Image (cartoon, coloured by chain):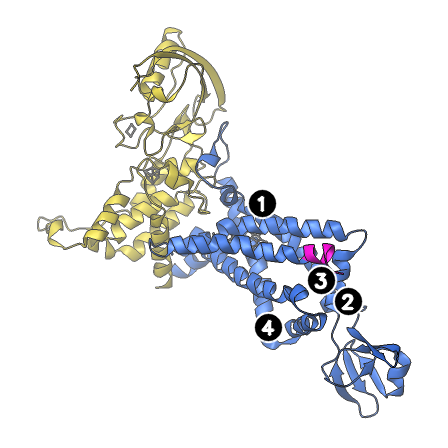
């Protein structure tokens, strides 16, 4: 009885909704900290971070938790919404809901669906490229030596140069395997790891002469949607889990609203900065 | 207060012959309604007019007409129990309306509250939820102890009393965009969970009441807070949180 109650009942669905929603809030905070390096740090710091995020085992676990949370949150949300629509087969001829509830709270499913659409396009544009794109460029730097400009790969092998030129690389007895790994051909040992240039891809994406502006505007719009979702969602999750207390709830509500405004705002600043101000 | 005057109004009322029939909104003109009359007296006046015209009067629920029984149940101009907060339909007065107003009157809309006739809905789903656990079992063989012999902290007693103020009118369900009954069930669960007499059966109570609530086809709360605003008895959302806590505790046992 108790066991099945924790999976099937209305309240159980609400607990899962709240838990996955709050976990996604944590994810947002982490993701934001990483993204901010796009504007507050240089390309190599950002690409280092991107490599860390796609290879570190602890991060792997977190990322699977995140995929699961998004899928489950969306699935559970659709299920709840379906049941809620069924609970009122005939609607009111005249209804006045703005007198008793907020816009956000009444439109969580629509806002969530828009977020889902955003997440999918966002993952196609960046996540999938980072993970699967065979043509993903490696990060290079240009160094001027005796009046001559030369490109070098940025790698984990600090201090050593790996020329970004196939014939020179060949001369040094090096080759690139698995897209990012620099091998000493003769000894068959891995010398260093190159960084996929996610920074370059991102900047190119938002500065694209045809779609850059649309992409930037769409991103900003998505962050508005996220803000509305969180405006109601953050504090709502605590109520769902039964945490409502005269002393703490006002703080949770205040924090939730600050979170709902600040996080999407900071996310949105990044593409705007890249598109309009980055040289 | 300004003196009473008479107003002329247009009413748009949901008419439905019986549970099976397909209903529709009908329009009625009603003249010379005193602003001193109550909303239900206005409907009485309309029904007299309809009877004089040899038409079927409008069926609507009511009993005490003083805000305590929970029978009255109208969705008036898009709001449960009308534009006032903290009042039932029977406590609403015509002074809230103006000459020439059009007033929509609809029944509670919920799958779990099917329309019986016109504005009357069947709220026995609430009774079944109560029967599933909204009680304490006591031995009534003659040796019952005085309830007041058990000390109850003042704070808990007050919260329990506030929860017990719920009159089971169903406005929370009617106004909720999800047709959720969680404010009602939260109040009923809390009323007992807070008191020592109720703690004994707390685990089974919350599991059974929530199961019955789900079976009746009520929707799921999304914490919009509409119920708290429209509840004539000011039942707080804290009661839903308490139910959620109680249920989590009970499920993990
Ligand atoms: C980063 C993305 C997201 C975050 C941080 C997030 C966060 C939250 C939070 C904290 C809640 C409140 C939970 C509660 O009331 O117990 C919530 C509710 C909700 N979310 Fe999301 N969400 C996200 C994405 C989505 C997506 C993709 C969908 C789906 C289609 C969605 C649909 C919903 C729905 C329908 C609710 C209301 C459910 C209810 O209250 O019963 N959300 N979200
Ligand atoms: S909680 Fe309020 S609105 Fe709901 S049934 Fe009780 S008194 Fe009516
Ligand atoms: S008729 Fe009893 S509460 Fe309105």
Q: Position of residue A262 (x, y in %)?
A: 55, 55
Please state, as top left, top right, bottom left or bottom right, where the N terminus of chain A lies in the image.
bottom left
Q: Position of residue B49 (x, y in %)?
A: 37, 9
The reply to whether dot 2 and dot 3 touch (C-beta < 8 Å) is no
Q: CA distance from mark 2 to mark 3?
A: 10 Å
Q: Position of residue A184 (x, y in %)?
A: 81, 88
Say if the magenta span includes residue A278.
yes
The quarter of the rendering in which ligand 3 is drawn is top left
Q: CA distance from mark 4 to mark 3?
A: 17 Å
Q: Colour of chain A?
A: blue
Give the answer, above or below, for where A232 lies relative to B118: below
Say if the magenta span includes residue B131.
no
Which mark is on residue A133? Answer: 2
Chain that appears yellow: B
Q: Residue furthest left?
A: B143
The residue at which mark 4 appears reads as: A59
The part of the chain drawn in magenta is A271-279
Of mark 2 and mark 3, the one earlier in the sequence is 3
Q: Is residue A90 left or right of residue B116?
A: right
Label 2, residues with CA under 10 Å away: few <14, some 14-19, many ≥20: few
The residue at which mark 3 appears reads as: A126
Secondary element type, mark 1: helix
Q: CA distance from mark 3 to mark 1?
A: 24 Å
Of mark 2 and mark 4, the one earlier in the sequence is 4
- Quadrant housing residue A161: bottom right
């Amino acid at each position: 009885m108790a066991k099945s109650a924790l999976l099937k009942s209305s309240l159980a669905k609400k607990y899962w909704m709240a838990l996955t929603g709050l976990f996604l809030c944590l994810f947002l905070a982490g993701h934001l900290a990483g993204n901010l390096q796009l504007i507050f740090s240089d390309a190599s710091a950002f690409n280092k971070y991107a490599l860390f995020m796609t290879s570190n085992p602890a991060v792997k676990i977190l990322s699977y938790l995140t995929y699961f949370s998004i899928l489950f949150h969306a699935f559970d949300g659709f299920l709840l919404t379906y049941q809620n629509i069924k609970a009122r087969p005939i609607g009111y001829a005249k209804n006045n809901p703005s007198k008793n509830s907020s816009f956000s709270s009444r439109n969580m499913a629509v806002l969530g669906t828009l977020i889902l659409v955003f997440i999918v396009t966002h993952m196609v544009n960046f996540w999938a490229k980072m993970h699967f794109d065979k043509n993903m460029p490696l990060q290079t730097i240009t160094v001027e030596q005796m009046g001559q400009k030369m490109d070098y790969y940025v790698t984990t092998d600090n201090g050593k140069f790996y020329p970004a030129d196939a014939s020179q690389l060949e001369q040094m007895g090096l080759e690139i395997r698995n897209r990012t790994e620099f091998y000493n051909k003769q000894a068959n040992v891995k010398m260093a790891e190159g960084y996929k240039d996610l920074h370059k891809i991102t900047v190119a994406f938002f500065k694209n002469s045809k779609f850059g502006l649309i992409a930037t505007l769409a991103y900003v719009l998505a962050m508005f949607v996220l803000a509305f979702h969180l405006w109601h969602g953050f504090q709502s999750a605590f109520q769902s889990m039964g945490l409502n207390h005269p002393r703490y709830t006002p703080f949770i509500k205040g924090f939730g609203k600050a979170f709902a405004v600040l996080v999407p705002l900071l996310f949105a600043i990044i593409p705007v900065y890249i598109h309009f101000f980055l040289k | 207060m300004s003196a009473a005057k008479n107003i002329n109004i247009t009413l748009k009322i949901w008419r439905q012959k019986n549970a099976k029939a397909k209903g529709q909104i009908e329009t009625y003109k009603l003249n010379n309604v005193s602003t001193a009359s109550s909303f239900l007296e206005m409907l009485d006046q309309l029904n007299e007019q309809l009877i004089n015209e040899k038409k079927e009067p409008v069926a609507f629920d009511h009993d005490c007409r003083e805000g305590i029984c929970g029978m009255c149940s109208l969705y008036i101009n898009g709001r449960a129990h009308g534009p006032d907060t903290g009042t039932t339909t029977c406590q609403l007065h015509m002074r809230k309306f103006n000459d020439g107003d059009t007033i929509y009157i609809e029944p509670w809309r919920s799958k779990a509250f099917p329309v019986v006739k016109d504005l009357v809905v069947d709220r026995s789903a609430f009774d079944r939820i109560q029967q599933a656990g909204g009680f304490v079992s006591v031995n009534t063989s003659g040796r019952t102890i005085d309830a007041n012999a058990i000390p109850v902290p003042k704070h808990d007693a007050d919260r329990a009393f506030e929860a017990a103020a719920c009159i089971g009118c169903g406005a929370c369900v009617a106004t909720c965009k999800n047709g959720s009954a969680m404010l009602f069930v939260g109040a009923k669960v809390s009323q007992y969970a807070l008191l020592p007499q109720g703690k004994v059966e707390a685990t089974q109570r919350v599991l059974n009441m929530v199961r019955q609530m789900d079976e009746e086809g009520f929707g799921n709360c999304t914490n919009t807070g509409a119920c708290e605003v429209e509840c004539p008895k000011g039942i707080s959302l804290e009661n839903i949180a308490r139910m959620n806590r109680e249920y989590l505790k009970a499920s993990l046992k």
